[in-house]
Amino acid sequence: MSTASQATPRLAPGRSGVKKELPDRFKDYRHVWVFLELERGNVHPVSFELLGEGRKLADKLEVQLAGVVLGPPGEMVKDAVAEAFAYGADLVYIVDAPPLADYRNEPFAKALTDLVNTHKPEILLLGATTLGRDLAGSVATTLQTGLTADCTELDVDSDGSLAATRPTFGGSLLCTIYTLNYRPQMATVRPRVMPMPQRVDKPVGRVMRHKLSLVEDDIVTKVLGFLPDNQSAMANLAYADVVVAGGLGLGAAENLQLVKKLARAIGAEHGCSRPLVQKGWMPADRQIGQTGKTIRPKLYIAAGISGAIQHRVGVEGADLIVAINTDPNAPIFEFAHLGIVTDAIRFLPALTEAFTRRLSPHSRDKLAS
């Protein structure tokens, strides 16, 4: 009789030691799908960002790019379909039924898993939003396939496998994950990680409809009403053109006023690095980085932020990064476009004053007109 002490330990093989051998039931899975997150009449912008990335993957694999739209019958779904084609889809799958008017996990997961089982995509991408994360986990579990969450990069390996890269170990490392022997290969990507593709008006292409195999009486959860978010003043960092953020280098919570004043002077959003949220100096919706918001502004000003990899992942898509730090060896200077080695507490008021003087004549002219 064998015992645990007698057993020879075996190490899990690395990617180079794993041979991709798809079971026969997966060999006819083809094409790249993007789930278009549709809620209360609007398509979430991350869906268009994923269509742009999906287009690249589909072209490498020489397959089609498909959008997936789930929603109630009517103009809302039709508009989403038209937008899918405008952002690069070759065809769109539709499941339109009254139970899909508002997001609930059960009918959405059933609709998407039935679509996958019927039409067999090799790659399925969703936005890493609250809705997308909830749906992706349920679908991957039901399909018994792999799911790589919060990806920062997607590519196709030489054998056609999806290479999904994401931070790990608290953001200190980047790892690339493969789903070698299962299909579909699933991944979620956070908003603003991928660039927005160009929108091109074009006629609606091929549309394939699928029937929802549930009726309202089959669904346990019910929508009693809709309460809009009362926190309308919450940060919209992900889609801001200009962002000013502060870090531990500011020294004290009251010094965050310097960041806010500069942001007001230039019409920017303000944010912070993770340690400030952990200290309670700023709310979580203002956090920038891998565990907060990913941003792609035209201008990002970072004051007193060291630039650890968690923060870098969240900001490196910015067109121009200006870093202010007293430490000339701070990691942020490795990826900032412009670095200023100085005390942010002294520099921010001077910068705010300079911007105010420069911008105020234009503001007066605008008011006068």
Image: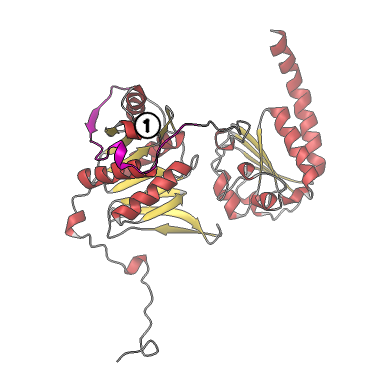
Residue 81, visible in the rendered structure: yes
The region drawn magenta spans: 201-226
Q: State the image coordinates of residue 125 (x, y, percent, origin top left).
A: 36, 44
Residue 344 located within the stretch drawn in magenta: no
Classify the position of the N terminus by image quarter. bottom left
Coloring applied to the structure: secondary structure
Q: Which residue is mark 1?
A: 101
Residue 129, visible in the rendered structure: no
The answer to whether residue 301 is left or right of residue 31 is right
Q: How many marks?
A: 1
The answer to whether residue 69 is left or right of residue 326 is left
Magenta segment main secondary structure: loop
Write the residue at 37% across / 25% down: 76
The answer to whether residue 175 is left or right of residue 366 is left
SS category of the residue bearing label 1:
loop
Q: State the image coordinates of residue 116 (x, y, percent, origin top left).
A: 26, 45
Classify the position of the C terminus by image quarter. top right
Amino acid bearing label 1:
Ala
Residue 32 image-quadrant placement: top left
Q: State the image coordinates of residue 231 (x, y, percent, origin top left).
A: 61, 34
In the image, residue 209 sits, relative to residue 19, either above or below, namely above
